[in-house]
Each structure stands twice: as structure tokens, then as C-alpha cells.
Image (tube, rainbow, N blue to C red):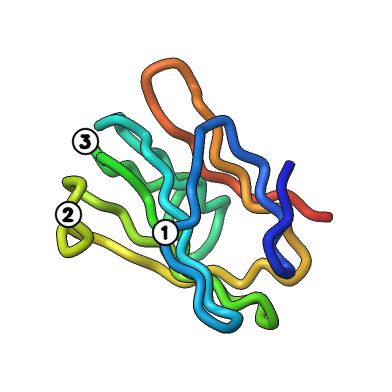
Amino acid sequence: MIEIGLLKLDIDFEYRIIREENDDVDIFIDVNYRSLDLECGENDFFNGRIQFPFVRSLILRINKKSHLMTVHFMRDIDLFSAFANFEFDYKDYIFNIKNNKEKVLITRTKK
């Protein structure tokens, strides 16, 4: 597990910081064109998960003093190739990015 600012990240993939200015940090994670399952839990809108096929990489954009992160799914190595993104409040959570055979599983767990 790694900690960057207030973010606790449990990750099976290599990562690198591609930008760090003041308290803003961008983290690049190469997942090598795998399918990615975003675990949503049970709620009124989704039933379990959302799957994104053929994801090249992720960029996590955080502020070290905040609990809010933006996660970008990239189609290519180009920073302008994002095809989806969402915000995640990780105040009481550990953000998990796990290698599950040929796919990536993103979940959250209580601290």
C-alpha cells in the first residue's frame, strides 16, 4: 500500500508520478489494454459493476490536501485519449486497483 497526500492506494501495478505542482499530483498507471471492472456495489442506479474494455492506462489526479480524486481512463498513451472519468471521495476509504488475471478490478474498502 502506498500513501500520497491523504490517498491510501492498494495497487498491483507499477505507477509513476507524471506531474507534481504545489499540492496537485497526477499518477500514471499502465494496465496494458486490459478490461477494467469498476465495482459499484449495490445502489439505486447500478447493479454491481461497470466494465470498460481495452483500457490502456489510468491517470489519478489528486490534491494532497483534499479527499477528492479524479480517475481518468485512457485509450492510448496520449494524455488527451481519455474516454471516461469519474470523481471519487476517498475520505474513509482505501482505493484498490488489482490485477485479476486478464482484467483490472477497481474497488474501495473502508479504512
Residue 87, label in figure: none
Q: CA distance from mark 2 to mark 1?
A: 13 Å
Disc 2: which residue: 78
Which callout, 3 or 1, points at the residue further toward the start of the chain?
Answer: 1
Is 38 positioned to the left or the right of 56 in the image? right
Q: Secondary structure at mark 3?
A: strand
Residue 92 % position (x, y): 78, 66
Q: Amino acid at mark 2?
A: Asp
Q: Amino acid at mark 1?
A: Ile
Q: On the rendered image, what quadrant is the C terminus found in?
A: bottom right
Residue 56 % position (x, y): 26, 40
Is 97 positioned to the left or the right of 4 in the image? left
Q: Image quadrant of residue 29?
A: top left
Residue 15 % position (x, y): 50, 43
Q: Residues within 10 Å of mark 3 (few under 14, many from 20)?
A: some
Residue 43 % position (x, y): 54, 61
The residue shown at (54%, 68%) is 88
Q: Residues within 10 Å of mark 1 (few under 14, many from 20)?
A: few
Disc 1: which residue: 18
Q: Secondary structure at mark 1?
A: strand
Q: CA distance from mark 3 to mark 1?
A: 22 Å
Q: Secondary structure at mark 2?
A: loop
Which callout, 2 or 3, points at the residue further toward the start of the chain?
Answer: 3
Q: CA distance from mark 2 to mark 3?
A: 15 Å
The residue shown at (73%, 59%) is 93
Disc 3: which residue: 54
